[in-house]
Amino acid sequence: MQRLHSRDAGFAQAFAAVVSDRRESDADVARDVSAILADVRARGDAALADYTAKFDGHALGDDWRIPAETCREAFDALDPTLRAALELAAERIRAYHEAQLPEDRDYIDAAGVRLGAKWRAVDGAGLYVPGGRAAYPSSLLMNAIPAKVAGVGRLVVTTPTPKGAINPLVLAAAHLAGVDEVWRVGGAQAIAALAYGTGRIAPVDVITGPGNAWVAEAKRQLYGVVGIDMVAGPSEILVIADGQNDPQWIAADLLSQAEHDPAAQAILITDDGAFADAVAAAVEAEIALLPTAAVARASWDAHGVIIVVDTLDEAPALANALAAEHVEIATDDPEALFAGIRHAGSVFLGRHTPEAIGDYVAGPNHVLPTGRRARFASGLSVLDFMKRTSFLSVSEASLGAVGPAAVALAEAEGLAAHARSIELRLGI
Ligand SMILES: NC(=O)c1ccc[n+]([C@@H]2O[C@H](COP(=O)([O-])OP(=O)(O)OC[C@H]3O[C@@H](n4cnc5c(N)ncnc54)[C@H](O)[C@@H]3O)[C@@H](O)[C@H]2O)c1
Ligand SMILES: N[C@H](CO)Cc1c[nH]c[nH+]1
Ligand SMILES: [Zn+2]
């Protein structure tokens, strides 16, 4: 962990280095991913099986696809408390995303031209559910429920099953969310299979979901062959906290994201130096209690940052430069700082809103842009599974009103056939 003070000489340079920290994807990852994508495109299922053996330690036999029946059985066998938790999460995620459904437009403008747009779902969506270091039934719900709400016809999940171990809660979530296909493949190779198709897996139109550096880079490289939601890579949290917080709570919040991945990042901004010390000590005490200590330790040591500022008024500008996936504001009046936050995947307001509540049950999507992409991207939504087709209808009268201007522009562009197609109808 590195500790900075905004008053120190050299802070601007040190902070710039934090902002440009390339945790997610370096040249090696990009090169390895492009080789994997090319190989899956060329060799299909054989390449998928090879990479699954290499990275997941699992030999695919006749068990590539998990039958719907197995998912239903996993759901039926759930412990009642876990089943209720999954159902609560699903209900809340569904309600939040139903409110995102866009409305078609159809109207006649002042010139008498009928104009509008129709929203339609994609035919097939590939939903990446991470599974390398942890299993993510919550990410299955976060992917599949918006896709269902959008009206996608075919929902295809890919998820790695390291050493062949299948997480039953992921299967139960697939049943609950109405997923059509579950394939036991992960990593860049799974993204390639979804984009190009293989002998077994038919291609999809859009790929969504989070993953580690290889998954995120594969989606980035394949954009254009398929649609993607955004690049949702290793998790990040920025906590802005005054000295009135319990240091243990804040330490736990920082570690909640550090434990995802050695490439994850947790940052604290505070205006209280003694509180910064207390949080640093609490992180050490909390890490010792975690079964995920090794990953959390690697992330905190390599990418953790504590920044002490003179006043929290400095925090929004720093937060906007970081454009973090998650921003927690733990103060009495979080709205005051929230007003200045322009770039963040999701913001958690107040001392009783830990980021982890958003990971599971709050309702907004936890698939969020990382690596400063919140400057231009948003969290996964129903709209990522839909596209808009515009339409127009021009009557003889309204062609008379707007047609001559189009003819003038076509002639100015030197495109005579364009001009004629309008002029002939105008009888010119
Ligand atoms: N941004 C978000 O919205 C969000 C949400 C949830 C999780 N996450 C992130 O998802 C990630 C989950 O990562 P994970 O590793 O547990 O699961 P994962 O499924 O994303 O990755 C596992 C796969 O990575 C591939 N891989 C691992 N090492 C490789 C190597 N050296 N070369 C090529 N491929 C390799 C393997 O194919 C393996 O199957 C974490 O980074 C977590 O922070 C992000
Ligand atoms: N924090 C992750 C997004 O960065 C989502 C998640 C799923 N399960 C636990 N956490
Ligand atoms: Zn999380």
Image (cartoon, helix red, strand yellow):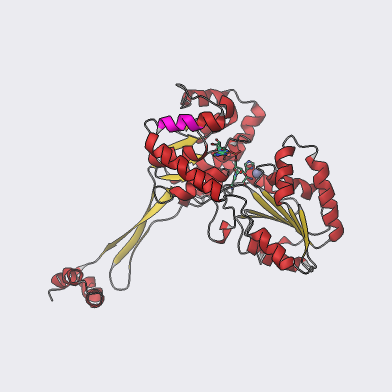
Q: Position of residue 15 (x, y in %)?
A: 70, 63
Image quarter for residue 350? Answer: bottom right
Q: Position of residue 306 (x, y in %)?
A: 76, 56
- Residue 107 as seen in the image, left or right of residue 34: left
Image quarter for residue 400? Answer: bottom left
Q: Nearer the viewer, residue 285 or 152?
A: 285
Stretch in magenta: 45-51
Image quarter for residue 317? Answer: bottom right
On screen, 120 above or below 204?
below
Q: Nearer the viewer, residue 250 or 193?
A: 193
Residue sitting at x 22%, y 67%: 395
Work out which quarter of the rendered image holds the C terminus and state it: bottom left
Q: Position of residue 106 (x, y in %)?
A: 34, 60
- Residue 81 as seen in the image, left or right of residue 8: left
Q: Is residue 136 visible?
A: yes
- Would you say residue 361 sits in the magenta stretch? no
